[in-house]
Every structure is written in C-alpha cells, then in structure tokens.
Amino acid sequence: MKHHIFTVIKNYHMIEPGERVIVGVSGGADSVCLLRLLCEYRREVSFEIQAVHVEHGLRGQESLEDAGFVEDLCEKWRVACRVEQVDVPALSRSEGLSCEEAGRLARYRIFEEAAKEWGARRIAVAHNQNDQAETVLWNLARGSGPKGLGGIRPVQGKLIRPLLFSSRREIEEYLRAEGLSWRTDRTNLEPDFTRNRIRLTLLPWMEQNLNGQSVRHIAQAADRLQEVSSYLKKKTDEAAGRCIVLSEMGEESGVLHFREASPGTDFPRETAVRDGYGTSVCILLDFYKKEEPLIQKELLKRAVQLCIESAQKEDCCNADDVSLIQNARHTGEQAVKNTCPGEKEKTGNACFICSGEMKNFGAVHFDMLLRLADMDCGKSADLPGGIYAVRENGILRIARREPAVPAQTRGENMPTQTRGESVPLQACGENIPAQTHGDMPAQTSGESVPLQVCDENIPAQTCGRIESVPMQACGKSVPTQTRGENVSPPGMDDTGYKGFPLTADGMLLPVPGSIAFGEYCVTAELTENAPELKTKILKENKCTKWFSYDTISNSLRVRTRKPGDYLVVDARGGTKKLKDYFIDQKIPRSVRDRIPLLADGSHILWVIGWRMSEAAKVREDTRRILKCTFLEP
C-alpha cells in the first residue's frame, strides 16, 4: 500500500520538495494512516509536516482523549502538532447549522488559518475510496450532474487526498500490519446522518448482495466521470467564449462595456450600450441556440456561476477560503452559511459564495432558464440568492439584485410653492442609490419560484454592436443616439444621475429658479415670446427644452414616474401612457425608476434626456415661454 500511495502523490504532483504540508489528523484510522505514510514519504522527498487536530467539544472526555492521542502520536513521530478547541454546539446555534456542518466549517477554517500562518501550500486530508463511493451515491440520490457524480477530486486547490484510491479495509489492514492503533469516533457509528446511513447500511448491503467490489467500481466510475466532466468543461469554455459576455459599468457614466468571458469570441471586446443593471451576465441567444442542448444547459449554469463570482470580486472572501469551502460541495457535504470570517460584521449578510448559494440552484431553476431563453422579450424569472434573469432583445441577462436602499428626499419641511414664487436652491444630500422598482420581488435563498411573466412586455435593448459618437451638449460630451440605439441621458450612472436619489414625490422646480442634485441641476427661466426666440427653440437639444408656459396648470416638479403618468404625443392631443412610451423606446426596466421627469401633475412635460410633450410645445400664439435646462451647475 505504501508504494501505491507514493505513486498517487507523485502522479498528481501533490507534494513537491521543500514544501510545507498541513495534515488534518482526527486520530481515526484514515488520518493516522495518512500521517504515517507522509512521515514515510519524507524519507524520499524532503518536506515539512504539521499536524492539526480540532477538538470539537462534543464528546466530553472521549474527545479530549482523542486530542491527547494525536499529541502523543506526533511527539513519537517527531511531527509538529497544533491542537485547536472549538465549541461546536455554540457555533451550531450561532450559525443556524447542524453540529455536523458546524464542525466541518470549524475544521476547514482552522486548516486554512494554520496553512496561512505556517506558509503551507498544501492541506492533506484523509478521504478514501469508501468516502468517494458514499459521495457519488449521495450525489446520485440528490440528482447531481456529471460533475457531482465525479465525486471527490484528488487535488482541489490547496487540498490533497493521497488516500482517495485506497479502501477503508486496505487502510485498516495496513495499520494492523504496522502495529498501529487508532481512535474510533462513536458518532460515525450512529445512523442519524445521511452519510452514516450510506456508510453503515447501503454500501455493505451492495457489497453483500450485488457485487463484492461495489465500492471500488463506484469509485472507478467516478474517475471516468471526472474525465467526462473535464471534457464537458473544455467544450463549455469554448462555447462560453462565443455566447457569454460580462457587462460592467465603464468609466463613462451610464456606458456598459462588454468583455469576453473567455478568449476566442467573435464578439467585440468593448461594445458600449446604455443600461442600468450594473454588473450582469449576458447570454447572446443567436450564438447560444446554435449549440447542442447539453452545452446550452452547461452555458446556463456557467452564466449563473459567473454572476455569483462577479459578486465575490467585490465583497467575498479570498480565493483560498472559497476553494476550501467549495470542497464541501464536491464531497457531497452540505455547504455552510457565513463561512467568510468577519463577513457578517462587514455586510450584515452571509458571504454569497461561501454560503454555498450555487447549491441552491437545482434542475427546476435551470429548466426555468431554458424556457425563458425561448420566450418573448420582457419575460423574467426570480432565482435563489437574489439572482434574476430577464429575456431581452437577443440576449438572456442574468444579474444579482442588490439590497434595496430606501430613496430619500431632500429639503425637509420644504414650503409649498406657488406659481412664479422663487424657492432657494436645494443642495443634494447623501449619495444614496434610488430604490429599485418592485417588478420582481426578492426571493429567499433556495426557494423555488415559478417562472414569472412580467407585467410589462419589454422588447429590451440588445447587447448590440453600437458605436458611441460624442457630441457637445450641456457643456458635456455625451453619446449621440444612432438608429436603433437606446441612449440614456447624460450623467446617468447605475444609481441615477450621479447618485441623485430622486423619488416619485420629487422636488419642486421654482419658476424662475433652479434645483440641484449631485453634479447636475435643472434651471427654469421665464420669458415673453418673441420672433427672435424661434431660432433658439429650433436649436434645442437633449439638455434644453422650451415650453409653452401658458399650458402649464400646476406647480412643476422634477420627479420619477408614478401610476397614471402620460405624455401628449401628437398635435391632436393624443396621449400615451408613460409606461408604454418606455416600452416603445426599449428603456430597460431597471432604468425607468431613475429617469427624471418634469411633471405638471400627471402630465409629463419632459422625459429628461428623451422627449417632451407635444401639448407643451411653443406655438405661434404662445405668450410666455419656459426654458428648462439640465446641466452641470
């Protein structure tokens, strides 16, 4: 057996000369065998070992005796030993986990801490062939795909498993032959846990009644499925390069730059479009539909994974911590919440990656996405962990919903404005994102929600290949709208106009006067109609509009949309709901609640950055003219 283990270590490049290796040692047969064989391997390859034992505080004196046994063993074999004590019952209560999950969480945290402090590149754990068979059966019963059925990997990040190709029977026979004893954890003999029932009941029955080599054959099948999974990953990587792009806010406010998810795509490396989603993952459906059905399913999984990982870059723990916790998934063990130390104090929420959110995605959710990709634009689906998907024109967008922050208004106790009254300039307050529209309610993690049909059939914008052409307006360079392009007003970022938290109540606009928010302001000037103004009115742009003040019946407000808002769209007085206008203009739903409006009651005089109402346009018989400008103060 010794030479077999040494061959595994060499073939998988588990330990290189001069390295430091942390070894998890519980005192059981598997970990004692692992520690002994690594001590033997040191005679062939020079490297350092530190044993780490975690005392869980679960079995009283018996648990303390386990720790003493490991310390004595390490002293006898001249191995540095670190014993850590953890109150697993308290951790279980505080984290809302089972004792089994909390103990596993504590062990991997301590292994990682020990590796960092000692400068170890590897952490050796004692999973064996029986553990592999148990994992495959457990994943099979849960409906896992090829990756899950591949079970445990011999090398996974820092983790190495030299005993993975040896059975428990071989391990115990080796220890007896060497005259070595080990400790037995009585909780491993209790049928309270699913894994124990597989170990104690199912596998023995299979070996006795089906095939005496069941454990070995299941483990061998896992090896082959790992090869299948690797090949499938390679083909998915190639397809992802053609079909998936990540969208990120660029340096220019409101412009998204798409970048390829992997090399080899024909999609332009940077294509600017206007959007309000922040970071999201887009599947290009023209390319996606050319792929085989199996690859399509894998692309959907990849897109969800990329969406989760994009959140990790911003506020998750480091990659080493993630790789350790992800190990729990590959071994079939339930992932744990709040695995990132300090994350709860930092954000008030469990770390998204480390909480195992990907495990909350099952076949039902990916079936949703499959159906959604074939539906009309505007349909959407809510998914676990605050993830949602929207079918848009030519793409399936997958994004993560950020926690809602209530919008705030400015200028408490603002006096009611009378027409023509001058109100002092209102300075904006804190830079707080506007509250998102409630079209898609947040979903709790793991909850299965039927595919939603949104109330707005939105032919949303494509990832399209759009060129940005600068023009001068309001003293700023902003993109010129080209045919088929959806362009947001100047200054809009993913939280609104430079973070201005405009609300449906909005702010009164004094006439004459101005109001300010962020780096922008709206000014109102009143003048009498005159022939020389006609040329100026003809030169109006996105940032300046001229209105017939004679037609305005209420106080003016700059606000966001409300139910009942409408535009007058033709000279005959025909009206259109503001909602329908947004749909016609293919303005994404996520942007609509952040678009400022100049409103006269429910009559929208100006969708700032887009169009004005026909009813408010200056005509020959107009007496008083209102000039409104949206610009930097």
Image: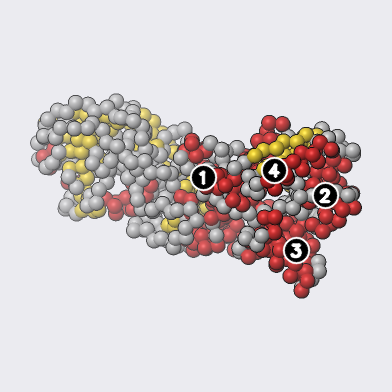
**Mark 4, residues whose alpha carbon is within 10 Å: few (<14), some, or many (≥20)?**
some
Q: Do tag 1 and tag 2 residues touch (Cβ < 8 Å)?
A: no
* Residue carrying label 4: 64
Q: Nearer the viewer, mark 1 or mark 4?
A: 4
The percent position of residue 443, horizontal first and vertical second, equals 43, 54
Q: Amino acid at mark 4?
A: Leu
Q: Nearer the viewer, mark 4 or mark 3?
A: 4
- Residue drawn at x 74%, y 53% is 184
**Residue 74, quarter of the rendered image:** top right
Q: Earlier in the sequence, mark 2 or mark 4?
A: 4
Q: Earlier in the sequence, mark 1 or mark 2?
A: 1
Of the numbered discs in the image, which one, if any, rests on residue 94?
Answer: 1
The percent position of residue 574, horizontal first and vertical second, equals 19, 54
Q: Secondary structure at mark 1?
A: helix
Q: Secondary structure at mark 4?
A: helix
- Examine the rendered structure and indicate whether residue 248 appears above or below residue 188: above
Q: Amino acid at mark 3?
A: Ile
- Residue drawn at x 63%, y 59% is 193
**In front here: 289 or 52?**
52
- Residue drawn at x 19%, y 47% is 602
Q: Secondary structure at mark 2?
A: loop
Q: Amino acid at mark 2?
A: Ser
Q: Amino acid at mark 1?
A: Ser
Q: Can residue 35 be seen at all in this image of the molecule? A: yes
> In the shown orientation, is residue 101 left or right of residue 611?
right
